[in-house]
Amino acid sequence: MYDRIVDQNDESEDPNGCGPLLSTGSPDAKPLRQQVFEHVRATGRAARSDVTRALNISAGSATTLTADLICAGLLREVEGLPRESGRGRPPVALEVVPEARYVIGIKLSDETHSAVLSDFAGRPVADTTIPSSPGRKSLDTVLEEVDVLIDRILKGANMTLPEISAVGMGIPGIVDHDTGTVTWSPFLIETDVDMRSAFMARFGVPVYVDNDTNVLSLAELWFGAGRTIADFVVVTIENGVGMGLVLDNRLFRGARGMGLELGHTKVQLDGALCRCGQRGCLEAYLADYALAREAATALDRNPRTPQSPYVMLDALFAQAKSGNEAARTIFRRAGRYLSLGLSNVIQLFDPGLIILSGERMQYDYLYSKEVLSEMQKLTLSDGRTPCKVEVHAWGGMIWARGATALALEAVTAAALGEARG
């Protein structure tokens, strides 16, 4: 079996800060001022001596830099750290001023849209969900639905849009994060959509857009298991198959935002038709629509009768559990293709951990011991420690919280630039 399964309802707030806890070894490391701020935010509270040790800087530098951040209204002094001995005053700690900035994270999907409003310390202030209109949508329709979502979460928090510094948005498909362009999405009618400009024109707030699996990877890096792991992979199985890669505590996106499209790697020439228009893609054997396509045959459903793929899949899973061999075969076949995809990930990146997530993780056939065993057989792992695999069947709101991290990254860099000036 897999190493650990996290229940989808286990989304409790981490009281000990947010963000990566490991320092990066990258030569283009962030400015020292920003490292100090992010260390305090990651630990929740830290004494100046802790900052000195963690960043290997002098006590004088720590004092100067933290004083600058306090003056800028980004950090503040608090009491509450335990004393190292029984005598003396408790050490003064530093923490992020939570009300210094606020951001909203949004996850767009086929069935629902989710949003989380977060303070500068990364703590959720409010969250909300609204239904998504059916089918592929125009940009105008998406922005209308986002308008409803933002209005609802602001009213719930008793806040106004001018109080929001930035919005992070996760959307399925191929996204150029640098330009805010959605090159292609199964969610949108149009292609090459300039989401950043359209959003800014409507709301007047900066938006940072990324592939939805990338924002889930940020959620793991900022709030989950990835906080203490330098290199890991997130693979999602829902209405598509996505992948996020974190190297040296940083999200890797590729040169043009088109990398890591695991769902569109080819596993069979001239194979099953994928919704991208090509054949033989991994997701054409694993995603919701792929399983629903075969479920109609296994359950003897009329293909002309419209039915939600989610209802179809739930019925298929129930049949598999009750002993229907045709239904079991569909899930076993999907599991074998998942083994193939994961073995390729291991061979290419040798990650410290693979995290499986998404709606389909409720189907235990996809993370059976047979799937893991097949994955190991397909890799050159003789004599080496096998790659760890965990199942994190999070609920939908964690994706939106990952989008808050996307916004917080940008807002932090801007705020630290202001502090420096």
Image (tube, rainbow, N blue to C red):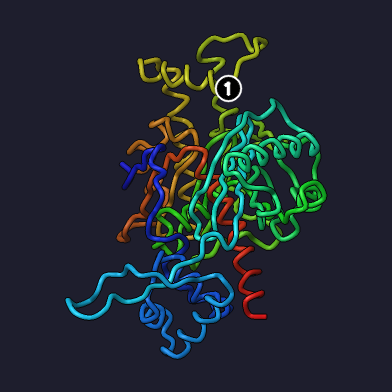
Name the amino acid type tagged 1. Pro
Which residue occupies 45% across, 71% down?
A: 39
Which residue occupies 47% across, 42% down?
A: 357
Local SS, label 1: helix
Residue 274, image x, y percentages: 66, 34
Which residue occupies 56% across, 16% down?
A: 296
Crowd class of label 1 (few under 14; some 14 to 19; many from 20; radius 10 Å)? some
Please tell me whether residue 411 is drawn above or below residue 10 in the rendered image: below
Residue 331, image x, y percentages: 45, 28
Residue 275, image x, y percentages: 68, 33
Which residue occupies 50% across, 39% down?
A: 358
Residue 407, image x, y percentages: 62, 57
Q: What residue is disc 1 on?
A: 309
Please tell me whether residue 276 is drawn above or below residue 253 in the rendered image: above
Please tell me whether residue 39 is drawn above or below residue 159 in the rendered image: below
Q: Is residue 387 visible?
A: yes
Q: Is residue 192 visible?
A: no
Please tell me whether residue 240 is drawn above or below residue 300 in the rendered image: below
Quarter of the image where one finds residue 18? bottom left
Quarter of the image where one finds residue 187? top right
